[in-house]
Image (spheres, rainbow, N blue to C red):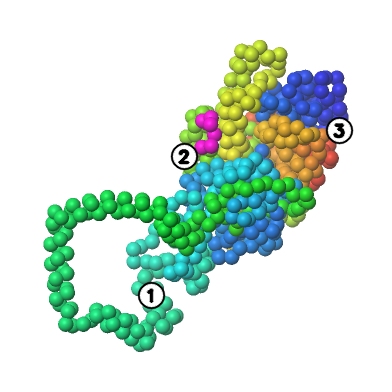
């Protein structure tokens, strides 16, 4: 690390030589009045807008749009997860088993659904806090893990307050037939097997029932359910449980009916005729109409009075307890406590819904990290070419978008908790729906790689598409206008206009920026899901059994987040830099045709626990097109056997020669990260 001390604050660089223009930007940062401690510059750094790409600063009281990644919250290994098969297991047990599981999740409308989840060890020796809820359960998690509140919004564990109401999951078994019944904060709930069957099997015919194949009524895994004709189902049950068809059963049933006079021939016809006439006559009378009105009013008054009475409240409590409702006092937070000892932590990645229920009966956000390790150890060139061709067919690149709006359920929620409406996000929402699951341009890529762990990997680099740019541009312009109005001392040409955190504009920008970070993750997840489906179709056995996938690793850049460094709460701006907190798993990709790395953060405080986000450019795009030799760059890739995207001079801005040596970049930050897996490119699609 090199330190420059000529400015108001030090500049710490993890590289020996930096271009003059980027250094001047770093010096501007070091002279700002709100910078905390120093300016950190990563080894991939180069010129950006206002702030160098690869720069990291912490600010006090302000946020700077031009300076502008999802953190991973996790749970202790003994945290229990309820599964759809009727059992529960700890996160550590699930991780050791290493298989996908089905869990309880909520969709964007807060309806109960089935989530497909992958367990993973996400951090070692992590700091924990305890969250105790009113049901008596204590949950151990990292301070940054998100809990779902009653309105469907999320709050990090460290920000929870006493009596905050968490989104509950109530589970009970009906006494009549033994089926599990589930509900959340509102509604009457649903039988679990009916919810699962509808999601995986579609709508049921009126003549069908939902059948558990293994006869275990608690096992509600999708593969264990089927629709079956009700008469056939009853016949099978009589065969499997003979008591229903025996003479003994028939005799008991008849004896009971005779005892009540039901079959006494003396009264049979008379009762029938009288009943039919009286009912028909009464139903047609004016008295019936008036009585219905009066009965409705009397019933309403009686029910209100009864429900408020001690007897009524007691009865409501008995019924609620029978079905498991209201048992846990709406899952309010009782208190928080820091845990003195650190532990390894685990989490689930839940496809599509990104949340899951704990056995403690509350819903939490899943962690996402974008590279995926597959079970494949080899892939032939012809198969690889087919896969890349299919990816190009299904995922738009460059300025292209989907022709139709994509599934809105995959979008981040428009956080109703915010006092400030998401003005720009709402304006761009329809456009974002068409951009969901698209790669974009510039240095964005999809790459198939071979790891030194012997496995085939999939890596995606993409962001929030035009949504993030539009939000940043709007608030930067707003900040410039306000800074001029306030006559701030920061020169306009520095392009570092700020918004106070406690201002309406600052809060609005934070809300919209966070939405863009979530949208970028949703975008990468959507693309990764499509690529996994393509891999499945071309895997050796033509089925999911032929190619399985580990948890997706996601690490973001270009964001600001409130963190505590050196005893102060500050806003850490990572522009082209990623989080490298101790034991955080991250990704540092190389350029087209060079190695990439899966890394583990060392938590170095000097860089505000950050590292580089890639190799970094060594020449601008136009310079690369002028100076690089097309044939030489193509030959570099062909000699390595890489299926690449360079076809003409217009593609040279993303050729390997336009970027720094990734191995040199990794070496410069050995005090920030350690290498877990080195990945070599096999095929690449560039934006």
Q: Nearer the viewer, residue 531 or 337?
A: 337
Q: Of the numbered discs in the image, which one, if any, rests on residue 405?
A: 2
User: Viewer-nearest of labels 3 and 2?
Assistant: 3
Which percent across, then down, holds residue 267?
17, 79
Which percent across, then down, holds residue 383?
62, 53
Span highlighted in magenta in the image:
416-422
Q: Earlier in the sequence, mark 3 or mark 2?
A: 3
Question: Marks 2 and 1, Cα distance to the nearest angstrom?
Answer: 45 Å
Q: Contact (CB < 8 A) between labels 1 and 3?
A: no
Residue 420 forms part of the magenta stretch: yes
SS at circle 1? helix
User: Viewer-nearest of labels 2 and 1?
Assistant: 1
43 with respect to 466 (left or right)? right
Q: Earlier in the sequence, mark 1 or mark 3?
A: 3
Residue 310 forms part of the magenta stretch: no
Q: Of the numbered discs in the image, which one, if any, rests on residue 1?
A: 3
Q: Nearer the viewer, residue 184 or 377?
A: 184
SS at circle 2? loop
Q: Which residue is mark 1?
A: 234
Residue at position x 77%, y 19% from top?
31
Residue 64 in view = no
Question: Marks 3 and 2, Cα distance to the nearest angstrom?
Answer: 48 Å
Q: Is residue 415 above or below residue 30?
A: below
Number of residues whose C-alpha sits closer than 10 Å to that of mark 1, classed few (under 14), some (14–19) or many (20 or more): some
Residue at position x 48%, y 55% from top?
183
Q: Contact (CB < 8 A) between labels 3 and 2?
A: no
């Amino acid at each position: 690390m090199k330190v420059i001390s000529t400015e108001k604050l030090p500049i710490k660089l993890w590289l020996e030589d930096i271009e003059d223009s980027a250094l001047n930007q770093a010096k501007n940062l070091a002279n700002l009045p709100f910078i905390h401690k120093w300016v950190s510059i990563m080894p991939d750094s180069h010129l950006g807008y206002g702030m160098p790409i690869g720069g990291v600063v912490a600010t006090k009281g302000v946020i700077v749009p031009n300076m502008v990644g999802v953190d991973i919250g996790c749970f202790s290994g003994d945290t229990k997860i309820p599964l759809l098969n009727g059992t529960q297991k700890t996160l550590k047990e699930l991780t050791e088993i290493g298989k996908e599981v089905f869990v309880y999740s909520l969709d964007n409308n807060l309806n109960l659904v089935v989530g497909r989840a992958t367990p993973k060890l996400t951090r070692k020796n992590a700091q924990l806090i305890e969250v105790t809820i009113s049901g008596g359960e204590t949950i151990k998690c990292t301070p940054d893990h998100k809990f779902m509140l009653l309105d469907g919004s999320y709050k990090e564990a460290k920000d929870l307050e006493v009596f905050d109401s968490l989104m509950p999951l109530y589970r009970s078994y009906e006494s009549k037939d033994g089926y599990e019944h589930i509900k959340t904060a509102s509604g009457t709930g649903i039988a679990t097997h009916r919810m699962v069957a509808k999601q995986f099997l579609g709508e049921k015919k009126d003549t069908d029932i939902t059948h558990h194949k293994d006869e275990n009524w608690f096992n509600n895994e999708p593969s264990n359910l089927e629709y079956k004709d009700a008469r056939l189902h009853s016949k099978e049950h009589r065969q499997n449980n003979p008591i229903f068809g025996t003479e003994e059963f028939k005799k008991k049933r008849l004896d009971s009916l005779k005892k009540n006079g039901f079959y006494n021939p003396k009264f049979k016809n008379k009762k029938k005729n009288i009943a039919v006439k009286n009912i028909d006559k009464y139903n047609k009378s004016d008295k019936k109409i008036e009585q219905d009105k009066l009965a409705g009013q009397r019933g309403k008054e009686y029910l209100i009075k009864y429900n408020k009475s001690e007897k009524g409240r007691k009865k409501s409590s008995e019924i609620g307890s029978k079905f498991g409702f209201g048992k846990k006092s709406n899952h309010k937070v009782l208190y928080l406590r820091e845990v003195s000892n650190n532990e390894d932590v685990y989490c689930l990645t839940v496809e599509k819904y990104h949340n899951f229920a704990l056995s403690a009966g509350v819903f939490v956000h899943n962690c996402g990290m974008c590279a995926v390790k597959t079970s494949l150890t080899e892939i032939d060139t012809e198969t690889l070419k087919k896969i890349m061709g299919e990816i190009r067919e299904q995922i738009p690149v460059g300025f292209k978008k989907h022709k139709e709006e994509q599934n809105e359920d995959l979008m981040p929620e428009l956080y109703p908790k915010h006092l400030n409406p998401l003005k720009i996000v709402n304006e761009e929402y329809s456009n974002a729906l068409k951009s969901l699951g698209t790669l974009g341009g510039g240095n964005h890529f999809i790459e198939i790689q071979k790891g030194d762990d012997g496995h085939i990997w999939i890596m995606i680099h993409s962001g929030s598409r035009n949504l993030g740019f539009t939000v940043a541009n709007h608030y930067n312009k707003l900040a410039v206008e306000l800074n001029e109005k306030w006559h701030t001392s920061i020169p306009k040409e520095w392009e570092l206009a700020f918004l106070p955190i406690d201002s309406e504009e600052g809060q609005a920008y934070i809300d919209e920026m966070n939405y863009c970070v979530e949208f970028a993750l949703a975008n990468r997840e959507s693309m990764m899901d499509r690529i996994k489906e393509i891999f499945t179709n071309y895997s050796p056995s033509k089925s999911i059994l032929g190619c399985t996938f580990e948890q997706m690793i996601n690490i973001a850049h270009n964001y600001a987040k409130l963190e505590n460094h050196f005893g102060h709460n500050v806003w850490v701006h990572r522009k082209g830099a990623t989080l490298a907190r101790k034991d955080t798993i991250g990704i540092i990709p190389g350029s087209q045709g060079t190695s990439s790395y899966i890394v583990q953060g060392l938590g170095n405080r000097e860089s505000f626990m950050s590292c580089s986000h890639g190799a970094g450019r060594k020449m601008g795009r136009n310079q690369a097109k002028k100076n690089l030799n097309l044939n030489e760059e193509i030959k570099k890739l062909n000699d390595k056997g890489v299926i690449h995207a360079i076809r003409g001079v217009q593609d040279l801005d993303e050729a390997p020669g336009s970027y720094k040596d990734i191995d040199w970049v990794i070496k410069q930050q050995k005090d920030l990260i350690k290498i877990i897996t080195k990945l070599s490119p096999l095929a690449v699609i560039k934006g």
